[in-house]
Image (cartoon, rainbow, N blue to C red):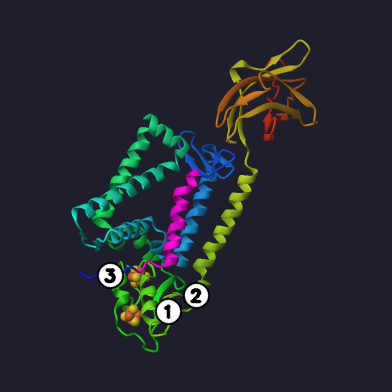
């Protein structure tokens, strides 16, 4: 078997290392004790930097998801399959496995793995290790690694988390040992999806030999992990890894010439101006619009949700002094990601304080906690013609006002109601 060409470029390798370390490292990063990015299953909340979004803020989840989705769509439209060649975990994992194989002197071809029993054991062990690492890394985005490892050691790790690690580890192992590059070529849904999205401005690798300098050494073909001959023009199987580009540069550099393969926006090589087309411009504007919306809503969201409902069966009670007592129930949910100590108060439309009687002061709301409290609103009068509004304020001792809503007092139909 011919020696496997090793043309993983320094730039591409550096990018793979950085992106891999970022993906593995992000779950370990915390800001003021909060994860940088985590979807917490136990509390059904999304943590992004210092902000915690509770499931109650589902619309913010949805907005974040759409921003992410359209960014990915735009990246695909602009950069084509650069993701596949430079950042896709599948490519990185196969490159890593082939790198280990190269270090121990093994030959790994798309169809075969050749080596001694000891070499094969090392390679299988590497595939299994990578599988376990990927499975655990996935779980760390849901269960903090600072909880994961102690639970693992104590044998109390959630069975779903254990199941996920084992399942992913097995899938990655099978993929690395039996499938490898075949997945990109034959099965990857993103690859199929991308072929639909190829745009006049999409970045592609292109063979440019207008002055016919090609020496037909076929280094570009031999190094291609997808078995493509780039000289035959753009092919949907190409993952834009640029291995052919580097192989050709090396060959031509020995002759003191520039390479014949390069990146270009658009199959026809129209340059960056090819990006100025309606599809790309529309999606860019959509991302800007959604991002502004996301930032605005995130900034203005309430840290405590408050729902008020009247306890109808308790009725309205009129005291001998003529004041009215109306029972209410408050449903509180802490979405701030930290414990709060809140008080509820109200003012009428003239700005005068309304008496709230009951446990409305120093209510401790635990992190992501919910509470229901009953209290009565005491007012000196009720209108017979309209529902008088009362502005209800929820104030935390540290954060200040965390919610403000309006309560409508009942209409006084008759004095005995
Ligand atoms: S043709 Fe070039 S860029 Fe495309 S997959 Fe093959 S080596 Fe990578
Ligand atoms: S590596 Fe360059 S010179 Fe060699 S065959 Fe490919 S395009 Fe031609």
Whole-number angstrom distance, CA of label 1 to CA of label 2: 9 Å
Q: Is residue 300 left or right of residue 173?
A: right
In the image, residue 345 above or below residue 236: above
Secondary structure beneath label 2: helix
Majority secondary structure in the magenta region: helix
Q: Is residue 341 left or right of residue 35?
A: right
Give the quadrant of residue 16: bottom left
- Residue 365 placement (x, y as % from top left): 60, 27
Q: Residue at x 42, y 79 (%)?
A: 268
Which residues lie in the magenta part?
A: 7-28
Q: Earlier in the sequence, mark 1 or mark 2?
A: 1
Whole-number angstrom distance, CA of label 2 to CA of label 3: 28 Å
Label 1–label 2 contact, CB within 8 A: yes
Q: Which mark is residue 347?
A: none
Give the quadrant of residue 404: top right
Residue marked by disc 1: 268
Examine the rendering and report whether any part of residue 157 can be seen: no
In the image, residue 43 above or below residue 272: above
Secondary structure beneath label 1: loop
Q: Which mark is residue 227?
A: 3
- Residue 397 placement (x, y as % from top left): 70, 30
Label 3–label 1 contact, CB within 8 A: no
- Structural crowding at the residue carrying mark 1, measured as other residues with C-alpha within 10 Å and reported as few (<14), some (14–19) or many (≥20): few
Q: Which mark is residue 274?
A: 2
Which quadrant is the C terminus positioned in? top right
Q: Residue at x 39, y 58 (%)?
A: 88
């Amino acid at each position: 078997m011919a020696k496997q060409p090793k043309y993983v470029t320094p730039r591409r390798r550096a990018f793979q290392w950085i992106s891999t370390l970022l993906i593995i490292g992000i779950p370990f990063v915390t800001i003021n004790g909060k994860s940088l990015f985590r979807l917490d299953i136990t509390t059904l909340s999304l943590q992004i930097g210092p902000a915690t979004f509770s499931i109650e803020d589902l619309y913010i989840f949805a907005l974040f998801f759409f921003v992410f989705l359209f960014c990915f769509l735009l990246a695909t439209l602009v950069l084509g399959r650069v993701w596949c060649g430079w950042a896709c975990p599948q490519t990185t994992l196969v490159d890593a496995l082939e790198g280990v194989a190269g270090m121990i002197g093994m030959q790994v071809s798309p169809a075969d793995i050749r080596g001694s029993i000891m070499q094969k054991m090392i390679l299988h062990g590497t595939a299994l290790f990578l599988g376990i690492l990927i499975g655990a890394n996935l779980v760390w985005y849901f269960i903090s690694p600072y909880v994961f490892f102690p639970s693992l050691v104590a044998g109390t790790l959630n069975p779903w988390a254990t199941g996920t690690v084992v399942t992913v580890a097995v899938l990655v192992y099978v993929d690395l040992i039996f499938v490898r590059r075949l997945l990109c070529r034959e099965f990857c849904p993103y690859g199929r999806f991308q072929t639909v999205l190829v745009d006049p401005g999409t970045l592609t690798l292109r063979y440019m030999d207008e002055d016919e300098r090609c020496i037909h050494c076929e280094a570009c073909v031999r190094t291609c992990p997808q078995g493509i001959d780039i000289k035959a023009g753009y092919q949907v199987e190409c993952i834009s890894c640029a291995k052919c580009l580097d192989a050709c540069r090396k060959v031509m550099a020995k002759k003191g010439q520039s390479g014949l393969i390069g990146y270009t926006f658009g199959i026809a090589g129209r340059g960056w101006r090819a990006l100025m087309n309606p599809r790309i411009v529309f999606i860019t504007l959509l991302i800007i619009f959604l991002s502004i919306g996301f930032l605005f809503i995130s900034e203005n969201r309430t840290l405590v949700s408050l729902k008020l409902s009247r306890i109808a069966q308790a009725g309205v009670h009129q005291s001998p002094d003529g004041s009215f007592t109306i029972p209410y129930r408050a449903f509180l949910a802490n979405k701030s990601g930290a414990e709060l100590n809140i008080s509820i108060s109200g003012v009428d439309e003239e700005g005068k304080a309304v008496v709230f009687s009951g446990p409305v002061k120093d209510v401790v709301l635990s992190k992501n906690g919910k509470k229901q409290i009953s209290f009565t609103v005491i007012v000196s009068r009720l209108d017979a013609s309209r529902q008088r509004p009362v502005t209800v304020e929820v104030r935390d001792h540290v954060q200040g006002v965390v919610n403000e809503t309006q309560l409508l007092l009942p209409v006084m139909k008759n004095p005995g109601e």
